[in-house]
Each structure stands twice: as C-alpha cells, then as structure tokens.
Image (tube, helix red, strand yellow):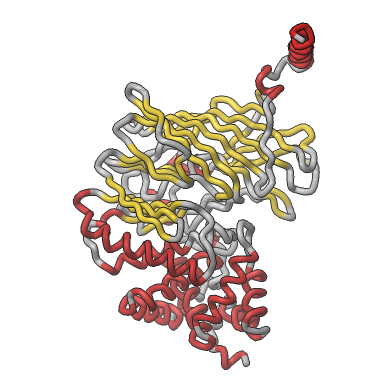
Amino acid sequence: MKKILWVIGMIGVGLAVVLYVAEDRTDLLSVFSSKPDLVDVNTAYEVDVEVFPDERTAKATMKVYTKNDTGKTQDKIYFQVLGNKFHDLDKLTSEGWRDYLGPAPEPGGLGFTKITLDGSVTDYTLEDTILEIPLENWKENETIELTMEFDITVPFNEGIFSYTENNIYFANWLPIRAVYEDDGWYKNEFHPVGDSGYYEPADYTVNVTLPKAYQIASTGVETSEPIEYETKKTYEFEAEKVREFAMCVMDQTYQVKSEEVDGITIRSWYTPDSEEGFETYHSAAVEAFKHFERSFGDYPYEEFDVVPGPRTFLGMEYPGMTVVNSDYYQTGEKFFIPTIVHEIAHQWWYAVVGNNPIEAPWLDESLTNYSTLQFLKEYEPGLAVEHAERYAEKTAQLPALSRNGHTIESPTTEFQDSELYAALIYGVGPQMFNTLEKEYGVEKMNEALAYYYENKQFGFATKEDMLAAFIKVIGPETEDYFNQWLEGNPVEMEEIQ
C-alpha cells in the first residue's frame, strides 16, 4: 500500500514538473488553483489592502475572476478606475469640477505596479479612468484570472473618495469590470454632476489591514473577529451580489450602535458630540427599513452601516452602507431625516434594482426621492408637506428649467452644474410619481413598485421596465402619463384618460 501511494505521489510531482516546464510563465500554485464557480455573478474580487491612515495611502493586491458572458469572443476587457480621475487636477477646470473639488483639493488616485493574466505578466493601458487589458482569445463562458497590484493615494476634495481629520472614505477606489452592453463595452465618463458609478453585481472578499487604533465600516459583513498582530489588525469582509465595495476607516473617536430589524443589523456610527442628534437619525433609519421592506420587498443583505461623512455634501449611497454629512449629526434637527431615508431607499433603487445612472439618473434618484416622501407622509407628516410643496414648486418652474432642452430624462452629461440637475431629477421627477399616487393611492403605487423590484433584482432596469410594471398593475394609460412627464409636459392623469 505504501508503495502504491509513493508511486501516485511521484506521478503527481512529475505532472507538476511537466506543467511547469510547458508553461514557464505560470507559477506552480496558479496551475493548480481553482477558479470560483461564477453562477449568479460574472465576476468575483479578492482584495488584500493595507491602509496607512497617517499618510492617507494604501497598498493593494486584487485578484479578479471574471467570466465572458458577453455572447462573443473578446480580445480586450475594460475596467472602470473612477478614483484615478484625481491624478491631474489641472484638467478638471469646469464649473462642475470646481464645485466638486472645492477650494483646496489635493491630487490622488491609483498607481498600478503589475497586472497578470492567468499568472503571466500582461500589458495594459490606463487612459483617464479606463483600464484596458488585451486578451488573445477570451472565449464565451470562459473564466480568466487577473491579478492587479496597485498603490493608492487618497485625494482630498468635496466628494466621497477623500478624507477628514478623523476618517478616510474609500469609494470608487477599486478597479471594477466595465458593463458590456449590446453595442460593446460601456466606458464610463466620470462627470462631476450626478453619479458615474455604473456597476454589475459581483462577489467581494476584502481583507483590510489597519493600525490597531483604527476601525472600519464597509459594504458586506465581517466573517470573523479581526486578526490582531503587534501593532496592526486585519478585518475580513464578504459581500455577495453587490455593485461596489465601499469602506470608511475611522479613528477611535467614533462609536457605534447596532440594532436588528427583521434579521438586518443596522449600525449607526457617531461621535460623542453628536450622540443626541444620532438617536434621531438612527430611529429614522430603523423605521425606514421597516417601511421599505413592507412597501417594496425584502432587503437581501445582512447589514447596513450609516457613517458620518464629510461636511461638503448631504449623503451618498453604497451597497449596505451610506455616508452622510456629519454636521447634521450634531444638531439633531429633524430636517435631516429625509437625507438618511433617501440613502436607505437607494438600497432598493440602485443597490438591488440597478440602472445606468449616467444615461437615466431619474430611474433611481427620482424614484428614491418619491420613496422618501412616501415614508415621510407616515413618519414625519410635517416634513412630507414641506417636500411635497418643494416638488410642486419645481414642477411649476419647469418651463424655465427646460429652456435649454433639459428634461427629467436628460443624462447627467448634459448638465453643467448640480443646481439644474437637482431641480429636475430630485424635484420634478418625484412629483411625477407623487401626482400619480394622488390618482391611484399609495397601495396601488407600491403594488407596481413591488412588481418592478421583484422582477429587476440584481439587473439593470430601463424606462421600459418601469413602464411595464405600472402598465401591468394600473393600466396602459400610465405609459402615456410617464412619457408626457419625461418629455417635459407634466400632466394630470385625467388629461390622459
């Protein structure tokens, strides 16, 4: 028996040597490594990153397993590297970029040191925010393995890939596979107005090493207690079927309160000087989750983090996490509740039901603002009246807002500043839904939205998908209603019928 085992072992060694000699560019481990079975997603990311908070830098290695589900053989693959936009600030001189960057921006971004394809070093080009990697013959349904090594310098600006005295916000910081559409790869343009993140769901495993004095909130869940070393510790996170992975590295100033709602852990972070205000917003977050699950459908993730963020914007959504303006935490004023709720509603309209936020920002932003209004009518009626009046006011101003051809349906790239974008997408857009609610009632609206949510989970929705849900639940007359509003002609339902 021992002789047989010895022979089998020698055969295995010999096979390994033959494979290694036959492909001398591939190390032995990669020959025998198993690629994940990509069933519900086309890509899995395995990230190891060490963050150096004092220097506001990081060093990362990311392994990418990605399957060719494009329907044809490919000779290239593209990744979005949106965080690279801030390398050369001299090129960002438009009014929109000046507003985005603020008065004292600092450059930053990613610097690649090596990329390998199935174990072999490969060429690549990085132009602005698009990484192109050549492939010889990437066949349909074939999975390839890429490894990217890169250094990160966190920029300073008034956006969400930046830092403050006490924390660092990592958003748009990882290279993410570009979306493949019917006419080819969609190469995102990072525009200062609106949201440029157009991502497919993917699986992430992320190991983050930090100095012991720091802590972290992120997309996904911790799989175990942090591993501690002499001066550092390593967190491991897993996130399945999420569109991106964001995280916030914080010092010990921050504390956290956790509460479970229908199996979802809601974690709200705060500082001692904002504890009073924090209770107001944490309670709103808990109630918002209850409302949206009841109205639209189950939240598919296990955890959600609310993190105080830079004082330069109201809030920003990510899968399983939102960053909100920390100034408002110190006031405790109820007028900030809609911001918290808006970002939570994005977990349904963005994180789960995706869309192209560049070409059709109304699909998630207008619907999210309507969902927020719907919640406020039940939870804070006074705030609901204020917001409904604001939406009606913006709608009354539509002829002036549309004088240059802008409508709710305009892509973000047609807006030169955030003011007009916000008026149309965040003001007129939700009024389109609210006016329809007055005709048919909230229950009928939610029946249509629940159908939409169930049928477009983890995909990309279009205007046609949205209209199909309302046509099915309410009737064919809703198609003309929505099209009239989207073309810049706000109507009552009775004018359609």
Q: In the figure, residue 283 lies in which quadrant?
A: bottom left
From this viewpoint, which residue is outermost toward the front? 1
401 relative to 358, above or below: below
Query: From the image, which quarter does the C terminus lie in?
Result: bottom right
27 relative to 248, above or below: above
Does residue 6 appear in this view?
yes
The foreground one among 286 and 159 is: 286
153 relative to 169, above or below: above
Asked if residue 335 lies left or right of residue 449, the reply is left
Does residue 171 appear in this view?
no
Residue 480 place in picture, x, y as percent: 64, 83
Asked if residue 1 lies left or right of residue 200, the reply is right
246 relative to 260, above or below: above
Residue 273 place in picture, x, y as percent: 19, 51
Residue plotted at (34% across, 29% down):
211
Residue plotted at (44% across, 69% down):
291
Residue plotted at (58% across, 25% down):
114
Query: From the image, which quarter does the N terminus lie in?
Result: top right
Q: In the figure, residue 339 lies in which quadrant?
A: bottom left
Residue 15 place in picture, x, y as percent: 78, 14
From this viewpoint, which residue is outermost toward the left? 273
Count of marks placed on residues: 0
Residue 344 place in picture, x, y as percent: 43, 61
Residue plotted at (58% across, 30% down):
148
The foreground one among 289 and 405 is: 289
